[in-house]
């Protein structure tokens, strides 16, 4: 399978199964419309006929031979070698956990997926006892995995800061005995950040996610307190201080864009201008949501991703660089076939725990009773559901099987699939279109960085 497209003057051909990216000339690009395996010795007459007005017969024949050579070298139309790995996609130890430490929040963001913090189940903080049980649960269910990931999430985790500190201390105190290493992340809305919390986060958290929507007017329309007031002026200086003290530890500012700011490259650059160089802006895609993007919005959104790519390249020419997370796709695909096939690991090697100790496949499943996997205090953990998530790979999802983006996207977001399509294995179309557009931009950016811009 191949995928070909034109962007920023480049003719790009992705060989899906080998992961090979070919920058080709116009003739090769056009000829690929007419030829595919099995290849004959001679270029098909139809191709010769159709292309003869634009190219000479000699050039077409030579190009055909080159295509056949690439095929013989297994870097064009290569065979799918991955399906055989799908059968190894079985339940694995839990290595990552999202700890919903606070089902409460001071903000009332208009697009909040968590019902403004309580996931529709009542405002609640996790107790230290439950937090300890969660750490024990992770240690005991992590098999021989030496590195464990723990994300403090909410609602707003800093509303339960005392327990965050206690849990970090407790987890560290058990590392030696279990021969494990914890890596902590926290996501915050920034309102409660002060010097003590900034010091703690910069010392203990390997990564921190700072929520902010870009331009002040965009942020303050969506990210409001209960009294309707926007939070931008309160959080921005705190984030700047935190990042300034972070050294080379990871962080990123994370924003959201909606159908109200389809010119979201302005928000990306507003964040860059505010001093951040690790930036993510995610689209709202919820079906029926007042602010969600729809299929009709896509042409405008795609044009904006193109504009963002152009602006990023322009910036880089002037020596200014930043990472935009959605363009940082792993084009080298990484070493692990299983990860490529099933992505985030939700419900299998990744779970979320609520303040009541309930286990869900991930933070976005929290509150969906049908997907409650068990409870850490009661010692229940639904292994059947875990095994089902382990098998939710690209070959078990009909749309993904045939999709050129499958080894980068890894089958999309199971939570979105469930919430908007009613089935974790049914691809959510608008999310797919956005994913594919971002991937096309990411590949193009790589080409421009390697070969320079086309005249
Ligand atoms: S900060 Fe997060 S949890 Fe709180 S309302 Fe906003 S999106 Fe929801
Ligand atoms: S979720 Fe969509 S984009 Fe991703 S692999 Fe499946 S069909 Fe392709
Ligand atoms: S299912 Fe979706 S929201 Fe949940 S961890 Fe995976 S990608 Fe994230």
Image (tube, helix red, strand yellow):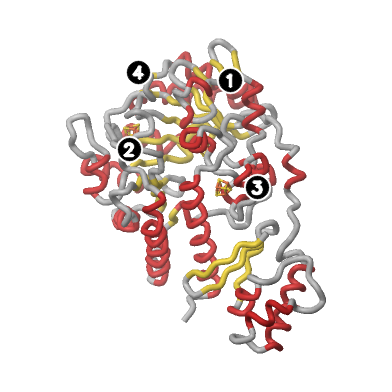
Tag 1 near tag 2, CB within 8 Å: no
Q: Nearer the viewer, mark 2 or mark 3?
A: 3
Q: Which mark is residue 401?
A: 3
Q: Marks 3 and 1, how far apart in space?
A: 35 Å
> Dot 4 corresponds to which residue?
122
Neighbour class for label 1 at 10 Å: few (<14), some, many (≥20)? some
Find out if the beta carbon at label 2 lies less than 8 Å from the nearest ligand 1 atom. yes
Q: Marks 3 and 4, how far apart in space?
A: 40 Å
Residue 37 relative to residue 436: left or right: right
Q: Is residue 58 above or below residue 114?
A: below
Q: Quadrant of residue 290?
A: top left
Q: Which mark is residue 137?
A: 1
Tag 3 near tag 4, CB within 8 Å: no
Q: Nearer the viewer, mark 3 or mark 1?
A: 3
Give the mark, 2 or 3, whose residue is nearer the N terminus.
2
Residue 451 relative to residue 279: left or right: right
Find out if the beta carbon at label 4 lies less than 8 Å from the nearest ligand 1 atom. no
Q: Identify the secondary structure beneath mark 4.
A: loop
Quadrant in which ligand 1 is drawn: top left
Q: Marks 1 and 2, how far apart in space?
A: 32 Å
Q: Nearer the viewer, mark 4 or mark 1?
A: 4
In this rendering, does residue 157 appear at all? no
> Dot 2 corresponds to which residue?
111
Give the mark, 3 or 1, whose residue is nearer the N terminus.
1
In this rendering, does residue 133 appear at all? yes
Residue 242: x percent and y percent? 34, 43
Quadrant where the N terminus is found in the figure: bottom right
Neighbour class for label 3 at 10 Å: few (<14), some, many (≥20)? some
């Amino acid at each position: 399978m191949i995928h070909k497209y034109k962007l920023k003057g480049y003719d790009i051909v992705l060989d899906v199964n080998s992961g090979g990216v070919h920058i080709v000339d116009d003739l090769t690009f056009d000829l690929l419309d007419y030829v595919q395996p099995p290849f004959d010795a001679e270029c098909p007459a139809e191709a010769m006929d159709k292309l003869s007005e634009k190219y000479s017969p000699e050039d077409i024949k030579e190009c055909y031979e080159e295509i056949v050579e690439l095929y013989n070298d297994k870097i064009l139309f290569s065979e799918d070698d991955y399906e055989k790995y799908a059968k190894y996609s079985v339940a694995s130890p839990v290595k990552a956990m999202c700890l919903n430490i606070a089902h409460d929040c001071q903000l009332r963001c208009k697009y909040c997926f968590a019902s403004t913090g309580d996931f529709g189940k009542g405002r609640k903080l996790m107790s230290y006892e439950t937090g300890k049980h969660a750490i024990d649960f992770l240690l005991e269910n992590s098999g021989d995995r030496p590195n464990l990931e723990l994300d403090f999430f909410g609602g707003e985790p800093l509303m339960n800061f005392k327990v965050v500190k206690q849990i970090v201390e407790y987890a560290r105190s058990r590392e030696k005995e279990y021969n494990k290493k914890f890596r902590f992340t926290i996501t915050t809305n920034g309102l409660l950040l002060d010097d003590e919390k900034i010091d703690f986060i910069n010392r203990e958290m390997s990564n921190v996610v700072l929520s902010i929507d870009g331009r002040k007017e965009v942020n303050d329309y969506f990210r409001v307190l209960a009294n309707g007031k926007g939070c931008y002026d309160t959080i921005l200086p705190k984030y700047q201080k935190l990042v300034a003290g972070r050294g080379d530890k990871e962080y990123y500012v994370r924003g959201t864009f909606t159908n109200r700011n389809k010119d979201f490259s302005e928000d990306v650059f507003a964040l860059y201008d505010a001093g951040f160089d690790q930036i993510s802006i995610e689209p709202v895609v919820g079906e029926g949501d007042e602010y969600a993007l729809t299929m009709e919005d896509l042409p405008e959104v795609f044009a904006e991703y193109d504009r963002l790519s152009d602006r990023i390249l322009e910036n880089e020419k002037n020596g200014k660089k930043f990472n935009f997370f959605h363009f940082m796709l792993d084009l080298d695909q990484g070493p692990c076939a299983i990860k490529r096939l099933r992505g985030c690991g939700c419900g299998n090697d990744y779970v979320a725990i609520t303040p009541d100790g309930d286990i869900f496949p991930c933070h976005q499943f929290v509150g969906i009773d049908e997907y409650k996997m068990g409870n850490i205090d009661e010692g229940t953990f639904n292994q059947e559901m875990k095994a089902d998530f382990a098998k939710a790979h690209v070959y078990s999802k009909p749309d993904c099987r045939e999709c050129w983006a499958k080894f980068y996207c890894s089958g999309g977001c199971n939570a979105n699939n469930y919430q908007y399509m009613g089935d974790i294995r049914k691809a959510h179309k608008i999310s797919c279109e956005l994913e594919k557009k971002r991937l096309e931009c990411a590949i193009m950016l790589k080409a421009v960085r390697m070969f320079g811009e086309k005249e």
